[in-house]
Amino acid sequence: MRGSIAVMLLLFAVTNSGCASFKNSVVYTYTDMNNNTYHISRNEVRFDPVTASESSSGYYSGGTPFSCILSEKSFQKIASLAEALVEASETHNSQRVMRTAVLVASHDGQPRRVILNPSEERVTLENLLASLRPD
């Protein structure tokens, strides 16, 4: 009996700590105008490029997929730029048209999606993300 109570308490603790860390999570997904996607979490960036067969031209390739560890400082810089873009409604578009990008900011599992027109702030974010690429 004691053993099963201890196992139940351990399972409860593991389950609840997983939920607590999820509830405190911040995740960004940035899809550029070519449909290359960056998945950004507190400690990692993963890049999923468009392949030639997925591109509208049939020739464009976004490059090589990669994943890298992010420092807290780098994450804070990306998060600051991303949050500014989410809040800058003057740079938003209601439709995904040519030259727009998509940014999804998920806080505690609640996503906020914006379509971004070209802007200096967007270029700054794209340059920072591109600087993480190993190639």
Image (spheres, helix red, strand yellow):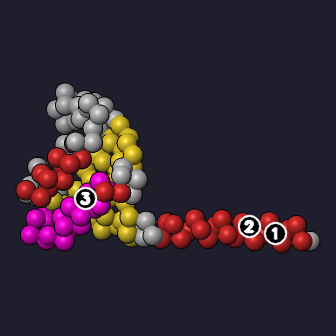
Q: Which residue is mark 1?
A: 6
- Residue 53 spot, x, y in % from top left: 27, 30
> Within 10 angstroms of label 1, few (less than 14), some, or many (20 or more) residues?
few
> Within 10 angstroms of label 3, few (less than 14), some, or many (20 or more) residues?
few
Give the left or right position of residue 124, taking residue 37 as reference: left
- Real-space CA distance between mark 2 and mark 1, rounded to the nearest whole angstrom: 6 Å
Give the left or right position of residue 7, taking residue 33 as reference: right
Q: Which residue is mark 3?
A: 77
* Residue furthest to the right: 1
Q: Quadrant of residue 60?
A: top left
The structure residue drawn at horizontal position 74% and vertical position 67%, both measured from the top left corner, is 10
Residue 36 colored in magenta in the image: no
Q: Quadrant of residue 61?
A: top left
Q: Quadrant of residue 27?
A: bottom left
Mark closer to the chain start, 3 or 2 = 2
- Residue 95 spot, x, y in % from top left: 16, 61
Label for residue 44? none
Q: Do tag 1 and tag 3 residues touch (Cβ < 8 Å)?
A: no
Amino acid at dot 3: Lys
Q: Describe the element under mark 2 as helix, strand or loop.
A: helix
Amino acid at dot 2: Leu
Q: Describe the element under mark 1 as helix, strand or loop.
A: helix
Q: Do tag 2 and tag 1 residues touch (Cβ < 8 Å)?
A: yes
The structure residue drawn at horizontal position 26% and vertical position 57%, both measured from the top left corner, is 78
- Which quadrant: the C terminus? top left
The span picked out in magenta is: 74-93
The structure residue drawn at horizontal position 92% and vertical position 71%, both measured from the top left corner, is 1
User: Could you say which is closer to the camera, residue 114 or residue 87?
Assistant: 87
Choose mark 3 or mark 2, whichever is in front: 3
Answer whether residue 94 is visible to the viewer in this image. no
Q: Which residue is mark 2?
A: 10
Answer whether residue 125 is visible to the viewer in this image. yes
